[in-house]
Image (spheres, rainbow, N blue to C red):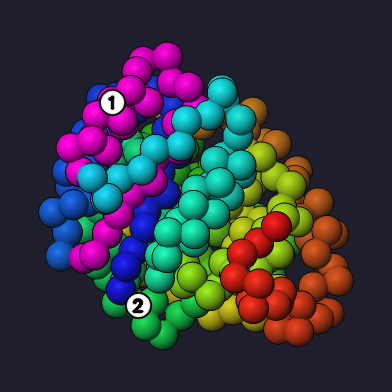
Amino acid sequence: MRITIVIPTYNEAENLPKLVSALFMLPLDVSVIVVDDASPDGTGRLADELAAAHPGRLAVLHRAGKLGLRSAYLEGFRLALESGAEAIAQMDADFSHDPQALIAMAERLATCDVVLGSRYVPGGSVDVRWSPWRKMLSAFGNFYARTILGLPLRDVTTGFRLWRRETLLAMPLERIRASGYIFLVEMAYLAHCLEFRLGEVPIYFAERRAGKSKMSLRIQIEAALRVWQVWWGYRDLRRLGRAGRRDVASQMFD
């Protein structure tokens, strides 16, 4: 199975070379797409150097600035689908997602349409250095979103996911409007509304090794409020279910 891993970056020069090396050491057929938002620390230039060192295995999308998580992933998905990927992964660049977990996720994809790396299923956990407040906020955010949306998942905000090619092609991704971290919730809910098979495998979510986190309390509060917009925005697909899937004969989303 050919897996293409889409990695959005902004100021990840300290992490990217080590992450790419770890991914290419996996016993999987993987390639990488780096989507860089004009990182001032030179991440984009470094990604170009890595692409030259790994011809055919790493591609770089350079963007004009910080254009948001939604567009970064959607542009990366498009390129991955055009390049013939059989499965598409999404993950952070900061080593909070262990590359080794992709092995179990790829195995689980044999019986699912999308597999999520979960902190909140048995065997999953978060960094031991997290404060009680941060643990509570993350756990409550997941409980809040999955309860409102009726999602059969324990970790709806995880950014570590592996999609079947056919799943992404059948999803009307042009309808997604969230530009922040709520994008992750919206993607999971859209797949659920269309009755795709959702699976989870346990992961250990580590604190980033280097660089500065992009998460803030403001972003988390905004995400909590946007959950209701997600619920309302897909009321038609909740009724249609599987029948709401787009025609995959076109082989590409708009």
| Residue 46: assigned label | 1
Q: Is residue 31 magenta?
A: yes
Q: Position of residue 173 (x, y in %)?
A: 67, 59
Q: In the rendered structure, does residue 5 fall within the stretch colored magenta?
A: no
Q: Is residue 31 visible?
A: yes
Closest to the camera, between mark 1 and mark 2, is 1
Check disc 1 and give the amino acid type. Answer: Leu
Please report the residue visible at 56 percent of the width from the left and 23 percent of the height from the top: 64
Percent coordinates x, y for residue 40 in the rendering: 42, 14
For the point 78% across and 60% down, the residue is 231
> What residue is drawn where x is 42% and y is 65%?
84
Which residue does the numbered mark 2 point to in the structure image?
Answer: 108
Q: Nearer the viewer, residue 212 or 107?
A: 107
Element under label 1? helix
Q: Nearer the viewer, residue 151 or 235?
A: 235
Whether residue 202 is visible to the viewer of this picture, yes or no, is no
The quarter of the image holding the C terminus is bottom right
Is residue 113 toward the left or the right of residue 194 in the image? left
Which labelled disc corresponds to residue 209? none
Residue located at (53% from left, 29% from top): 63
